[in-house]
Amino acid sequence: MIFSDLNFIISPLILIFLALTILIIDFYLKNKILLIYLSSLGLAVSSAVLVYQWIFMETGQYVFFETLIFDKFYILFALTLNLVSLVIILAFSDYILRKINFISEFLSLLLLSLIGSTFVIMSVDFITIYLSLELASLPIIALIAFGRGKFSLEASFKYLILASFSTGIFLFGLVYLYGSTGSLELMNIQISTISPSLIIGLVFLFIGVAFKLSIAPWHMWTPDTYQGSPMPIVTYLSTVSKIAGFALIIRIFMHLFSYEFDKNNIIIFLSIISVISMTIGNFGALIQKDLKRLLAYSTIAHAGYMLIGVVALISTSTAASTTIFYILGYAMSNLTIFFTFQYMINISSSTSIDSLKGMFHQYPLVSIIFSLGILSLLGIPATAGFMGKVLVFGSAINNGLMWLAIIGVINSFVSAYYYLGLLRNMFISTDEVKKSDNNGISYLFFSLITSAGVLTLGIFPGILLSVVDEVISKL
């Protein structure tokens, strides 16, 4: 090991130290809220280090025997993951204190999963990628069971079985990729001709990651897991896990498909998967009565939309910028929705869609913020979701995938039925909602911040696109 390489992974090292420290000091601290503040402080310091590295350190360097890469792509996504995790912990601090029995273990596991996600983005060796994916996934199995509800253990067990199954598929693809190319180092893999074994390897690698991204038809765990998980973990899965997974796909695809060979079969395969994911997600959401399950099917549909951008970047690398914009806009919208959703759960003590009825008449501000997040997922103008869909569908059209963009638009119209149905319950229904003074001001505060981000990205998309374009140009 070259100890100078440690300079490039200071941020995840801080998180590793933080995760272990929280477990140790829990023996001496009786005030559990200090653990939350310590976690937040550690994430803030880790984020500050990443900002410093972006400004002052030379990027584009391979470290740790060329298994990791230190570049602006890594810094951008690692910073995003840190900030999203920080916001989740602070916003759900009230939830964690009231409903989580083992707070130090909960926070440590969450941080360990975040560390794994960070290394997923940084890895350029497939063995390192595999280990990072496992570190990101294994803590989630335990975190799901913290829900203590009647579905929590079932959800955790389903995630365990299917995560193990997806790992096997990923490794199976890895074997074929190594047999076809003679290397497991991403930057040393060169593809001049396509072969059946190489196609099998790439397809199985994709399927292994698709399980973790809730891409249909490998989405079976998602609705049950969302329903049984604690709300902070549902929020984490729908944002941090999505960002890390698609960042990995973008890095792998941008390198592997930079070579000149026939990509038509792969484009057709991924396009079909995109259509399946959009369709299953949207039509599955139509029949849901529980809002957590509806949002689970929504995330399956949006994984299909994101996949449109991934298909487009196979032909044109600049399409990666549009995909990243969509991913980050989706994460911002979901944070807004889940924060306000928890606020409303505290009022109604229910996750049923019917519990939203009449909410606007008693709680207008939280209803408006929630609606903004929903409208962003739907793709209404002036929101991040709208700009994301315009960019992704536009990149598909520019790369000769007009039919795929049309199916995406049709699916967006289908989603309008259940998204607007939620708003109808909130704004039109006159049902009485009980008044409550202890709903958690943190949810409202952070949802205001994220909703401002949704509007900012929707009205001024160039703010983010200029940064993403710079990152992609050096990838």
Image: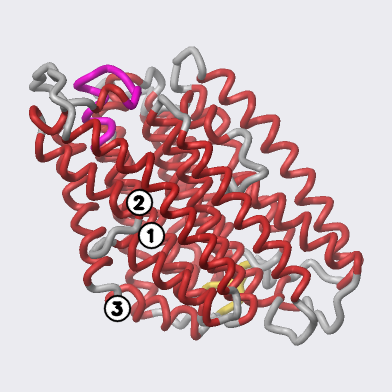
Residue, disc 1: 80
In the image, residue 303 sits, relative to residue 403, either above or below, namely above
Q: Is residue 304 left or right of residue 179?
A: left
**For numbered disc 1, what is the local secondary structure?**
helix
Name the residue type under label 3: Gly
Q: How is the image coloured?
A: secondary structure
Question: Which residue is nearer to you in this view: 8 or 51?
Answer: 51
Residue type (three-letter) at the residue carrying disc 2: Val
How crowded pointer 1 is (Cα within 10 Å; few <14, some 14-19, many 20+) is rated as some
Amino acid type indicated by mark 1? Thr
Residue underneath mark 2: 84
Q: Residue at x 29, y 78 (%)?
A: 462
For disc 3, the neighbor class at 10 Å (few under 14, some 14 to 19, many from 20) is few
Circle 2 or circle 3, nearest the eye:
3
* Cα separation between marks 2 and 3: 21 Å
The relative height of residue 349 versus residue 131 in the rendered view (above or below) is above
- Mark 3 lies on residue: 462
Q: Nearer the viewer, residue 113 or 153?
A: 153
Give the residues in magenta: 340-353
Q: Quadrant of the N terminus?
A: bottom right
Q: Is residue 81 above or below residue 145?
A: below
**Mark pair 2, 1: CA separation:** 6 Å
Tag 2 and tag 1, C-beta contact below 8 Å: yes
